[in-house]
Structures are given as structure tokens and as C-alpha cells.
């Protein structure tokens, strides 16, 4: 799979095994594992607050659907509209790849707004502050899946940890930006878990969400400078699509933290 000489020669098989036309892929396994572990962590968090199991189950159902649909539509709209507008049936062919984290974030925001109105009857920030903690960990799993697919990597590098993605016929080392992002997401998970467990942040609506936005999208903005363009139209852009989409989230994060700090704590009472 890999050997280290001057650089890391990466030639991982995206498929774990195949039976006829059915294949189990690393990306799918990591995606699903991330959600299962995220569900376990989220459930423990919410149970510690004596939240009803009905709320917990419905919340994660909404999130799973919203993440997949949002990430797919995000890729279609932000990165591949020229192609998909001419081949609309391919929008549903998710097995061919193509998910955008910004689209997933937008999908989750919409799903939690609906869930807050229909199920919890609480502010949307109550749900968001809790769900972003395991979401950061799920994001790290997804970027590891990107690494196994040899996709979404960086530009040429002379650093000794550069990856030569042989499956894509690369002959020069590139930045393993999937690993960079995964490490930042793991760091974000650790910071968010600390704030949830050791501080009163969960009682300040928007605080954890604001921290999440800053810790996830600030690194994403800067890593994009050393990442290869995902689509041809980005070649002439000073800032690529991923960076333009990251800026509003970072600004929103700053605003949310400021708002949470100037407002009094809120102690939520369960039904």
C-alpha cells in the first residue's frame, strides 16, 4: 500500500472486497462508521442531559438524511452544475463520487431547523450546539475516506511526507491535504468535547456552534491554498469555491461566539 523512500508512495485500493458487481469501499465504511460512532457519542451527551430517546433518534435520522442529500446537492450545485445540468440523472449516482462538505453543512442546518420546529420546540441553536461535537469527528472519518480514494489532495510538495498518488498515475509528491484536514477536525472534536464537558458553553446558545465553525472552516480556508482545484472553472479564481464558501461560516462563528458571551446562560428544562 505504501513505502517510504523520499516520499510516501500511496496506492491504496478503494475497495475492501468485491462480490460480483457488489463492492464494499473504504469510503463508505468510514462514512458509515463515523456516523455510528458519532451517534454513540451524541446519544451519551444528550442522555447526560436527560433528553428523551425519541428526540435523540429522530435528531440523528434527520442529520443522516440531510448530510447525504446536502453534500451531494452541494457538489452538484457548487462544483459540477455545468455537467449535471446536462446529465440530471447522474445527480442520483452517488456511487460515482461527489460530495461537498459545505453542502452537507447547509443540509444539516436546514434539517435541524425543521427538527427544532416539529420535534423539540426549542431554538435551533440548542440542537446545533450539541450535534456539532460528534460532527467534527465524523468529518475526520470522511476525510480519511477521501485519502483511501486518492482524491481531494494537494499541489506538489518537496516535504518528506508528500504522497505520490500512484493510483491516479501521479509521479510527483503532493500534499496529503486529506490528512491535514482530518487532523484539524480531530483537534476540533477534542476542543468541542472539552468545552461541552468542562465549561458552561452548552448553556450559552450558539457558543459551541461558533467554535465549530471557526475550528472547521478556518483551517479549510488556508488548506485550500495548497489543494488542487476540484473543478476546471476554479483555475482562474484568486480564491477557489471552497474558500468562498468557508468565509461566511467563519464570520458566522465569530458572531455566534460574541452573541453567546453577551447573553446570560440558559438552563434548559426537559419535558
Image (spheres, grey):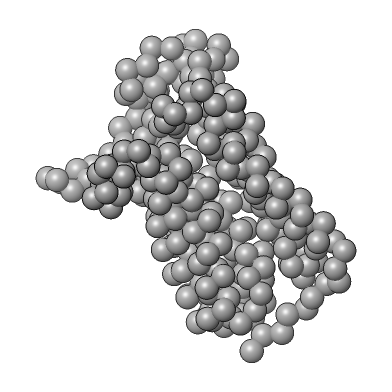
- Residue found 54% across the figure and 15% down from its top: 157
Work out whether residue 248 or residue 205 is closer to the camera in this orientation and state it.
Answer: 248
Q: Residue at x 40, y 51 (%)?
A: 73
- On the picture, is 96 further left or further right than 152? left
Asked whether residue 268 appears in the rendered view, the answer is yes
User: Where residue 4 sits in the image (x, y, percent)?
Assistant: 46, 16
Is residue 182 shown left or right of residue 31? right
Q: Which residue is at the far bottom?
A: 271
Q: Quadrant of the C terminus?
A: bottom right
For the point 44% across and 69% down, which residue is it? Answer: 61
Which residue is located at x 32 percent, y 23 percent? 167
> Could one spot residue 48 in this view of the protein?
no
Rendered image quadrant of residue 258: bottom right
Measuring from the top left, give residue 168's x and y in whole percent: 33, 22
Q: Is residue 185 above or below residue 233?
A: below
Q: Is residue 55 left or right of residue 213?
A: left
**Screen quadrant of the N terminus:** top left
Frontmost residue, 233 versus 205: 233
Of residues 259 and 152, the one drawn nearer to the viewer in this rendering: 259
Circle count: 0
The x and y percentages for residue 201 are 77, 63
Amino acid at each position: 500500500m505504501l513505502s517510504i523512500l523520499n516520499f510516501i508512495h500511496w496506492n491504496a485500493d478503494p475497495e475492501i472486497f468485491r462480490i460480483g458487481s457488489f463492492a464494499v469501499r473504504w469510503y463508505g465504511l468510514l462514512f458509515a462508521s463515523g456516523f455510528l460512532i458519532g451517534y454513540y457519542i451524541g446519544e451519551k451527551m444528550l442522555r447526560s442531559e436527560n433528553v428523551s430517546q425519541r428526540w435523540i433518534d429522530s435528531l440523528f435520522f434527520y442529520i443522516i438524511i440531510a448530510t447525504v442529500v446536502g453534500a451531494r446537492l452541494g457538489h452538484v450545485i457548487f462544483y459540477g452544475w455545468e455537467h449535471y445540468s446536462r446529465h440530471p440523472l447522474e445527480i442520483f449516482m452517488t456511487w460515482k463520487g461527489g460530495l461537498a462538505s459545505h453542502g452537507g453543512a447547509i443540509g444539516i442546518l436546514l434539517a435541524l431547523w425543521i427538527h427544532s420546529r416539529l420535534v423539540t420546540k426549542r431554538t435551533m441553536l440548542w440542537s446545533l450546539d450539541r450535534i456539532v461535537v460528534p460532527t467534527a469527528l465524523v468529518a475526520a472519518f470522511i476525510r480519511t475516506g477521501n485519502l483511501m480514494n486518492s482524491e481531494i489532495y494537494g499541489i506538489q510538495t518537496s516535504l518528506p511526507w508528500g504522497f505520490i498518488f500512484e493510483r491516479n498515475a501521479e509521479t510527483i509528491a503532493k500534499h496529503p491535504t486529506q490528512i491535514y484536514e482530518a487532523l484539524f477536525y480531530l483537534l476540533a472534536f477534542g476542543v468541542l468535547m472539552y468545552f461541552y464537558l468542562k465549561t458552561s458553553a452548552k448553556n450559552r446558545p450558539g457558543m459551541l456552534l461558533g467554535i465549530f465553525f471557526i475550528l472547521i472552516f478556518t483551517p479549510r480556508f488556508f488548506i485550500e491554498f495548497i489543494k488542487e482545484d476540484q473543478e476546471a472553472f476554479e483555475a482562474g479564481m484568486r480564491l477557489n469555491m471552497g474558500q468562498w464558501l468557508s468565509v461566511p461560516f467563519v464570520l458566522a462563528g465569530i458572531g455566534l461566539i460574541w452573541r453567546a458571551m453577551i447573553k446570560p446562560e440558559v438552563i434548559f428544562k426537559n419535558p
